[in-house]
Image (spheres, grey):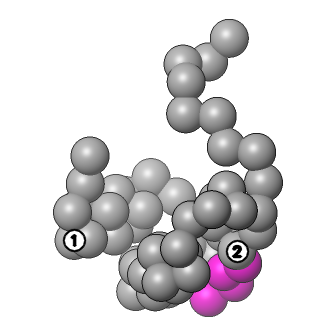
Amino acid sequence: MFGAAGFREDLKARFDLTQGVTVFHTANVPKKCVNKAIKLVRQAGFNDVRAEVGSVDLGPPR
């Protein structure tokens, strides 16, 4: 989908940087991947960043 730079730029373009971000992920995602996502979100300019295990549905909206 996106490389790291594209992901950061997409975040900057589509979201309000003053708002918090929660990185939802499934329990089996490696910790290094979650940490990388958090790092990229912070690099995009978000200060309030959290990671949470949740139910992730990547299918089309119903």
Q: Main secondary structure of the magenta part?
A: loop
Q: Looking at the image, which residue is at 63% across and 62% down? A: 28
Q: Looking at the image, which residue is at 67% across and 43% down? A: 56
The picture quadrant where one finds residue 18 is bottom right
Instruction: Report x, y in % for residue 47.
Output: 62, 88
Q: Left or right: where does residue 54 sit relative to residue 24? A: right
The picture quadrant where one finds residue 36 is bottom left
Mark 1 — residue? Answer: 5
> In this orientation, which residue lies closer to the viewer: 26 or 8?
26
Disc 2 residue type?
Ala
Instruction: Report x, y in % for residue 16.
Output: 57, 64
Mark 2 — residue? Answer: 51
Looking at the image, is 19 positioned above or below residue 49?
Answer: above
Instruction: Compute the Cα span from label 1 to label 2.
Output: 20 Å
Looking at the image, is 22 positioned above or below residue 43?
Answer: above
Disc 1 residue type?
Ala
The picture quadrant where one finds residue 25 is bottom right
**Quadrant assignment for the C terminus:** top right
Looking at the image, is 2 positioned above or below residue 32?
Answer: above
Report whether residue 46 is seen.
no
Q: Looking at the image, which residue is at 34% across and 70% down? A: 8
Question: Bounds of the magenta span?
Answer: 45-50
Regarding mark 2 in the picture, which secondary structure is present there? strand
The disc, 1 or 2, on the residue closer to the chain's N-terminal end is 1
Regarding mark 1 in the picture, which secondary structure is present there? helix
Say whether marks 1 and 2 touch (CB < 8 Å): no
Instruction: Report x, y in % for residue 46.
Output: 55, 81
